Amino acid sequence: MTGPEPENPPMPSPAVPPPAVLVLAQPVTRAEVARLCERLTALARRAGPGPVTVDVGGVGRPDLAVVEALARLRLTAGRLGRGIQLRNARGELRRLLAWTGLDEALTAPAALGHALGPEPGGEAEQREEALGVQEGVEPGDPAP
């Protein structure tokens, strides 16, 4: 004989959202980039926290269209407060990313709220005027 049923059965734990994984396949064209960014945005919004994984194993022979797509995907993820991490990136793609200077940008985690690009609020370099500031001369001012 079994005991009485508990009055309050244990609550099931809330489902943990799956990680975001975007799979790229050959051929990746420039015309596809906007659609890929939309897919990444949808995946990132449904997934748990952390970087979005971009699986590039099916890309085949990479070209600059693939590099452009990855750079745009990184910018999109950065705008969402996320980074991307590459999965199955082979030698040829890694060399192409290094050649273009994007290897570290595409593999480094994004700081929350920052996309690639200059930091806001920088200072003008020495002896340079800050943008938008013009020096004026009033009549009667002594010459320097």
Image (cartoon, grey):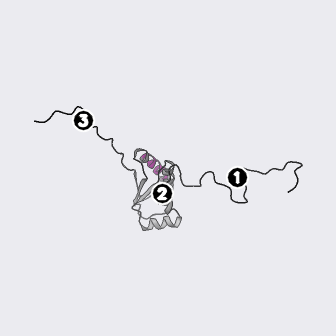
Give the camera-side residue of 22 and 13: 13
Q: Which residues are magenta?
A: 33-42
Q: Nearer the viewer, residue 72 or 60?
A: 72
Q: Are marks 3 and 1 in contact (CB under 8 Å)?
A: no
Q: Residues within 10 Å of mark 1 (few under 14, many from 20)?
A: few
Q: Is residue 65 visible?
A: no
List the residue tagged with mark 2. Answer: 70
User: Which residue is disc 1 drawn over?
Assistant: 131
| Structural distance between the alpha carbons of marks 2 and 1 | 32 Å
Q: Residue at x 46, y 51 (%)?
A: 36
Q: Find the distance from the CA under tag 3 to the CA under tag 1.
A: 65 Å
The location of residue 59, given as percent across then percent down, is: 41, 60
Of all residues, the one furthest to the left in this rendering is 1
Q: Disc number at residue 42?
A: none
> Which comes before the other along the chain, label 3 or label 1?
3
Q: Residue at (43%, 44%) from the top-left corner?
A: 45
**Residue 71 in sight:** yes
Please identify the quadrant where the N terminus is shown. Answer: top left
Q: Which residue does the image show at 36% across and 48% down from the upper left? A: 18
- Mark closer to the chain start, 2 or 3: 3
Kind of residue indicated by mark 3 = Pro
Tag 3, which secondary structure? loop
Residue 135 in magenta? Answer: no
Question: Where does residue 141 sit, x and y in percent of width and height?
Answer: 87, 50
Which numbered mark, 3 or 1, is in the foreground of this view?
3
> Mark 3 highlights which residue?
9
Position of 23 with respect to 3 (left or right) is right
